Image (cartoon, helix red, strand yellow):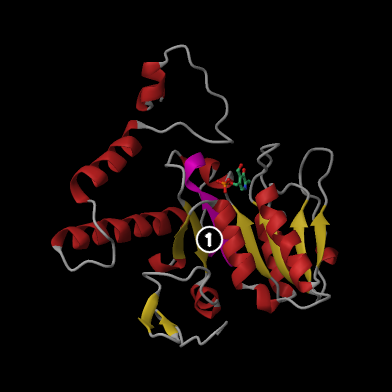
Amino acid sequence: MKHFFPIFTQRPDLIYFDNAATAQKPQAVLDAIQNYYTYSNSNIHRGPNFLAEEATVLYNEARRTVADFIGARESFEVIFTRNATESINLVARSLELMFNPGDTIVLSQLEHHSNIVPWLQLKERRGIQLKYIPVNKEGRLDFDPALLDESVKLVAVTGMSNALGTITNLKPIIEAAHRVGAKVLVDGSQLVVHEPVNVQALDCDFFVFTGHKLYGPTGIGVLYGKKELLESMPPFLGGGDMINEVTEQSFSPAFTRTIRGGHA
Ligand SMILES: Cc1ncc(COP(=O)(O)O)c(C=O)c1O
Protein backbone atom coordinates (compact mmCIF):
# COMPACT_ATOMS: atom_id res chain seq x y z
CA MET A 1 0.00 0.00 0.00
CA LYS A 2 2.84 2.37 0.85
CA HIS A 3 3.76 2.70 -2.81
CA PHE A 4 0.47 4.54 -3.48
CA PHE A 5 1.71 7.42 -1.30
CA PRO A 6 4.59 9.49 -2.77
CA ILE A 7 5.49 10.95 0.65
CA PHE A 8 7.02 7.56 1.55
CA THR A 9 9.18 7.62 -1.57
CA GLN A 10 10.36 11.10 -0.71
CA ARG A 11 10.89 10.16 2.97
CA PRO A 12 11.73 6.42 3.02
CA ASP A 13 12.21 6.33 6.81
CA LEU A 14 8.83 7.86 7.56
CA ILE A 15 6.48 5.86 9.77
CA TYR A 16 3.12 7.62 9.88
CA PHE A 17 0.62 6.66 12.59
CA ASP A 18 -1.49 9.82 12.70
CA ASN A 19 -4.21 8.77 10.24
CA ALA A 20 -7.06 9.40 12.68
CA ALA A 21 -6.00 13.07 12.63
CA THR A 22 -5.32 13.30 8.91
CA ALA A 23 -4.27 10.80 6.23
CA GLN A 24 -1.44 11.11 3.72
CA LYS A 25 -2.50 11.59 0.08
CA PRO A 26 -2.12 8.85 -2.55
CA GLN A 27 -0.80 9.64 -6.03
CA ALA A 28 -4.28 9.19 -7.55
CA VAL A 29 -5.65 12.04 -5.41
CA LEU A 30 -2.69 14.30 -6.14
CA ASP A 31 -3.09 13.53 -9.87
CA ALA A 32 -6.82 14.28 -9.83
CA ILE A 33 -6.22 17.70 -8.26
CA GLN A 34 -3.35 18.46 -10.62
CA ASN A 35 -5.32 17.32 -13.68
CA TYR A 36 -8.36 19.37 -12.78
CA TYR A 37 -6.40 22.60 -12.37
CA THR A 38 -4.22 21.83 -15.39
CA TYR A 39 -6.89 20.84 -17.93
CA SER A 40 -10.46 21.48 -16.75
CA ASN A 41 -10.46 24.44 -14.37
CA SER A 42 -13.52 26.66 -14.77
CA ASN A 43 -16.47 28.06 -12.83
CA ILE A 44 -18.88 25.22 -12.04
CA HIS A 45 -22.63 25.73 -12.54
CA ARG A 46 -22.08 29.31 -13.70
CA GLY A 47 -20.37 29.48 -17.06
CA PRO A 48 -21.84 29.10 -20.58
CA ASN A 49 -18.51 27.95 -22.07
CA PHE A 50 -17.39 24.38 -22.76
CA LEU A 51 -14.80 24.37 -19.97
CA ALA A 52 -17.41 25.40 -17.40
CA GLU A 53 -19.64 22.62 -18.70
CA GLU A 54 -16.82 20.10 -18.37
CA ALA A 55 -15.98 21.30 -14.85
CA THR A 56 -19.67 21.10 -13.90
CA VAL A 57 -19.89 17.52 -15.20
CA LEU A 58 -16.81 16.56 -13.16
CA TYR A 59 -18.27 18.22 -10.06
CA ASN A 60 -21.60 16.47 -10.45
CA GLU A 61 -19.86 13.14 -11.05
CA ALA A 62 -17.90 13.63 -7.81
CA ARG A 63 -21.17 14.20 -5.98
CA ARG A 64 -22.57 11.00 -7.51
CA THR A 65 -19.45 9.08 -6.49
CA VAL A 66 -19.85 10.26 -2.89
CA ALA A 67 -23.58 9.44 -2.94
CA ASP A 68 -22.80 5.89 -4.12
CA PHE A 69 -19.99 5.58 -1.55
CA ILE A 70 -22.41 6.15 1.35
CA GLY A 71 -25.50 4.60 -0.29
CA ALA A 72 -27.49 7.83 -0.65
CA ARG A 73 -30.56 7.58 -2.87
CA GLU A 74 -30.10 10.92 -4.66
CA SER A 75 -26.86 12.74 -5.44
CA PHE A 76 -28.39 16.08 -4.39
CA GLU A 77 -28.67 14.66 -0.86
CA VAL A 78 -24.88 15.12 -0.77
CA ILE A 79 -23.69 18.64 0.02
CA PHE A 80 -20.05 19.59 -0.19
CA THR A 81 -18.80 21.62 2.77
CA ARG A 82 -15.35 22.55 4.03
CA ASN A 83 -15.13 19.71 6.55
CA ALA A 84 -17.13 17.72 9.11
CA THR A 85 -17.08 20.70 11.46
CA GLU A 86 -18.80 22.89 8.90
CA SER A 87 -21.32 20.15 8.08
CA ILE A 88 -22.35 19.91 11.75
CA ASN A 89 -22.49 23.70 12.12
CA LEU A 90 -24.62 23.88 8.98
CA VAL A 91 -27.18 21.53 10.54
CA ALA A 92 -27.07 23.33 13.91
CA ARG A 93 -27.64 26.73 12.27
CA SER A 94 -30.20 25.62 9.72
CA LEU A 95 -32.32 23.60 12.19
CA GLU A 96 -32.05 26.29 14.86
CA LEU A 97 -35.70 27.33 14.73
CA MET A 98 -36.80 23.72 15.27
CA PHE A 99 -35.57 23.95 18.90
CA ASN A 100 -37.43 25.59 21.76
CA PRO A 101 -36.50 26.04 25.44
CA GLY A 102 -36.78 22.71 27.24
CA ASP A 103 -36.04 20.62 24.14
CA THR A 104 -33.21 18.11 24.42
CA ILE A 105 -30.31 17.14 22.18
CA VAL A 106 -28.65 13.83 23.02
CA LEU A 107 -24.94 13.43 22.32
CA SER A 108 -22.52 10.77 23.55
CA GLN A 109 -19.47 10.92 25.77
CA LEU A 110 -17.40 9.77 22.78
CA GLU A 111 -17.94 12.88 20.66
CA HIS A 112 -15.24 14.99 19.04
CA HIS A 113 -15.43 18.70 20.00
CA SER A 114 -16.85 19.37 16.52
CA ASN A 115 -19.95 17.44 17.57
CA ILE A 116 -20.24 19.11 20.98
CA VAL A 117 -19.47 22.81 20.60
CA PRO A 118 -22.08 23.64 17.87
CA TRP A 119 -24.73 22.12 20.19
CA LEU A 120 -23.41 24.01 23.23
CA GLN A 121 -23.67 27.19 21.13
CA LEU A 122 -27.23 26.21 20.18
CA LYS A 123 -27.96 25.64 23.88
CA GLU A 124 -26.95 29.26 24.56
CA ARG A 125 -29.07 30.58 21.69
CA ARG A 126 -32.21 28.47 22.17
CA GLY A 127 -32.29 27.42 25.86
CA ILE A 128 -32.20 23.70 25.11
CA GLN A 129 -30.58 21.02 27.28
CA LEU A 130 -27.90 18.48 26.35
CA LYS A 131 -27.76 14.90 27.60
CA TYR A 132 -25.01 12.37 26.97
CA ILE A 133 -25.06 8.63 26.27
CA PRO A 134 -22.46 7.33 28.75
CA VAL A 135 -19.40 5.31 27.80
CA ASN A 136 -18.57 2.07 29.66
CA LYS A 137 -15.20 0.67 30.81
CA GLU A 138 -14.61 -0.99 27.42
CA GLY A 139 -14.96 2.40 25.73
CA ARG A 140 -18.33 1.50 24.22
CA LEU A 141 -21.55 3.45 24.41
CA ASP A 142 -23.94 2.20 27.06
CA PHE A 143 -27.16 3.18 25.35
CA ASP A 144 -30.42 2.98 27.26
CA PRO A 145 -33.46 3.91 25.14
CA ALA A 146 -35.04 5.32 28.34
CA LEU A 147 -32.69 8.32 27.87
CA LEU A 148 -34.85 9.36 24.94
CA ASP A 149 -38.11 10.98 25.99
CA GLU A 150 -40.51 13.20 24.07
CA SER A 151 -38.34 16.30 24.70
CA VAL A 152 -35.55 14.88 22.51
CA LYS A 153 -35.51 16.55 19.09
CA LEU A 154 -32.09 15.42 17.89
CA VAL A 155 -29.54 12.71 18.61
CA ALA A 156 -26.03 13.54 17.34
CA VAL A 157 -23.65 10.65 17.75
CA THR A 158 -20.32 9.47 16.42
CA GLY A 159 -20.11 6.32 14.30
CA MET A 160 -16.60 5.60 15.56
CA SER A 161 -14.60 7.22 18.34
CA ASN A 162 -11.61 9.29 17.22
CA ALA A 163 -9.98 8.70 20.64
CA LEU A 164 -10.61 4.96 21.19
CA GLY A 165 -11.51 3.54 17.78
CA THR A 166 -14.63 1.89 19.21
CA ILE A 167 -17.51 1.57 16.76
CA THR A 168 -21.02 2.66 17.74
CA ASN A 169 -23.91 0.26 17.32
CA LEU A 170 -25.91 2.90 15.47
CA LYS A 171 -29.05 1.03 14.46
CA PRO A 172 -30.68 0.73 17.94
CA ILE A 173 -29.91 4.39 18.68
CA ILE A 174 -31.42 5.55 15.38
CA GLU A 175 -34.51 3.38 15.78
CA ALA A 176 -35.09 4.55 19.36
CA ALA A 177 -34.63 8.20 18.33
CA HIS A 178 -37.15 7.87 15.52
CA ARG A 179 -39.66 6.23 17.89
CA VAL A 180 -39.76 9.50 19.91
CA GLY A 181 -39.79 11.63 16.74
CA ALA A 182 -36.17 12.81 17.03
CA LYS A 183 -33.82 13.29 14.07
CA VAL A 184 -30.40 11.63 14.04
CA LEU A 185 -27.08 13.05 12.90
CA VAL A 186 -24.17 10.60 12.62
CA ASP A 187 -20.62 11.93 12.73
CA GLY A 188 -19.00 9.46 10.33
CA SER A 189 -15.59 11.15 10.16
CA GLN A 190 -13.75 8.09 11.45
CA LEU A 191 -16.31 5.44 10.50
CA VAL A 192 -16.24 6.00 6.72
CA VAL A 193 -12.52 5.33 6.67
CA HIS A 194 -12.94 1.89 8.26
CA GLU A 195 -16.38 0.43 7.50
CA PRO A 196 -18.79 0.35 4.55
CA VAL A 197 -21.63 2.81 5.18
CA ASN A 198 -25.15 2.79 3.80
CA VAL A 199 -27.15 5.77 4.97
CA GLN A 200 -30.42 4.32 3.66
CA ALA A 201 -29.94 1.07 5.58
CA LEU A 202 -28.94 3.03 8.69
CA ASP A 203 -31.89 5.38 8.14
CA CYS A 204 -29.97 8.29 9.73
CA ASP A 205 -31.26 11.76 8.87
CA PHE A 206 -27.83 13.38 8.52
CA PHE A 207 -24.39 11.87 8.03
CA VAL A 208 -21.22 13.97 8.03
CA PHE A 209 -17.59 13.31 7.26
CA THR A 210 -14.41 15.07 6.31
CA GLY A 211 -12.20 14.58 3.24
CA HIS A 212 -8.73 14.85 4.68
CA LYS A 213 -9.02 11.73 6.87
CA LEU A 214 -10.24 9.78 3.82
CA TYR A 215 -7.11 10.45 1.73
CA GLY A 216 -8.72 13.51 0.13
CA PRO A 217 -7.54 17.10 0.24
CA THR A 218 -7.96 19.38 3.23
CA GLY A 219 -10.89 21.77 2.78
CA ILE A 220 -13.62 19.42 1.58
CA GLY A 221 -16.27 17.74 3.67
CA VAL A 222 -19.66 16.15 3.19
CA LEU A 223 -23.09 16.61 4.65
CA TYR A 224 -25.61 13.96 3.67
CA GLY A 225 -29.20 14.81 4.55
CA LYS A 226 -32.51 13.20 3.68
CA LYS A 227 -34.05 15.10 0.79
CA GLU A 228 -37.21 16.23 2.61
CA LEU A 229 -35.14 17.60 5.51
CA LEU A 230 -32.69 19.48 3.31
CA GLU A 231 -35.59 21.00 1.38
CA SER A 232 -37.16 22.26 4.61
CA MET A 233 -33.98 23.96 5.84
CA PRO A 234 -33.20 27.64 5.14
CA PRO A 235 -29.93 28.35 3.29
CA PHE A 236 -26.86 28.35 5.56
CA LEU A 237 -24.59 30.59 3.49
CA GLY A 238 -25.85 33.25 1.12
CA GLY A 239 -23.98 34.10 -2.07
CA GLY A 240 -23.49 32.99 -5.63
CA ASP A 241 -24.77 29.64 -6.91
CA MET A 242 -27.48 29.29 -4.24
CA ILE A 243 -29.88 31.85 -5.70
CA ASN A 244 -32.61 31.81 -8.28
CA GLU A 245 -33.08 35.58 -8.47
CA VAL A 246 -31.74 38.63 -6.60
CA THR A 247 -33.24 42.12 -6.49
CA GLU A 248 -32.19 45.12 -4.38
CA GLN A 249 -34.57 44.10 -1.58
CA SER A 250 -35.09 40.35 -1.87
CA PHE A 251 -33.78 37.10 -3.24
CA SER A 252 -35.20 33.70 -4.03
CA PRO A 253 -32.94 30.74 -3.37
CA ALA A 254 -32.64 27.99 -5.95
CA PHE A 255 -35.39 25.38 -5.52
CA THR A 256 -37.13 27.04 -2.49
CA ARG A 257 -39.50 29.87 -1.83
CA THR A 258 -38.72 33.61 -1.77
CA ILE A 259 -37.04 34.87 1.38
CA ARG A 260 -37.46 38.52 2.37
CA GLY A 261 -35.32 39.89 5.15
CA GLY A 262 -35.00 36.70 7.15
CA HIS A 263 -35.67 33.00 7.43
CA ALA A 264 -38.26 31.32 5.25
C1 LIG B 1 -14.92 11.95 14.91
C2 LIG B 1 -14.49 13.28 14.37
N1 LIG B 1 -15.44 14.19 14.11
C3 LIG B 1 -15.12 15.40 13.59
C4 LIG B 1 -13.81 15.75 13.35
C5 LIG B 1 -13.52 17.10 12.79
O1 LIG B 1 -12.98 17.01 11.52
P1 LIG B 1 -12.65 18.36 10.71
O2 LIG B 1 -11.68 19.12 11.58
O3 LIG B 1 -12.04 17.91 9.44
O4 LIG B 1 -13.91 19.12 10.57
C6 LIG B 1 -12.79 14.84 13.64
C7 LIG B 1 -11.37 15.19 13.42
O5 LIG B 1 -10.50 14.81 14.17
C8 LIG B 1 -13.15 13.56 14.15
O6 LIG B 1 -12.22 12.63 14.40
The residue closer to the viewer here, 24 or 86, is 86
Residue type pointed to by label 1: Val
Q: Is residue 72 magenta?
A: no
The residue closer to the viewer here, 212 or 93, is 93
Q: Which residues are magenta?
A: 200-213
The residue that appears at 43% across and 67% down in the rendered structure is 73
- The residue at the far front in this view is 248
Q: Is residue 210 magenta?
A: yes
The residue closer to the viewer here, 75 or 246, is 246
* Spot occupied by residue 78 in the image (x, y as percentages of width and height): 45, 63
The residue that appears at 58% across and 51% down in the rendered structure is 188
Q: Which picture quadrant has residue 233? A: bottom right
The residue that appears at 65% across and 65% down in the rendered structure is 184
The residue that appears at 29% across and 42% down in the rendered structure is 32
Q: Which picture quadrant has residue 201? A: bottom right
* Spot occupied by residue 67 in the image (x, y as percentages of width and height): 42, 59
Q: Is residue 114 above or below residue 185?
A: above
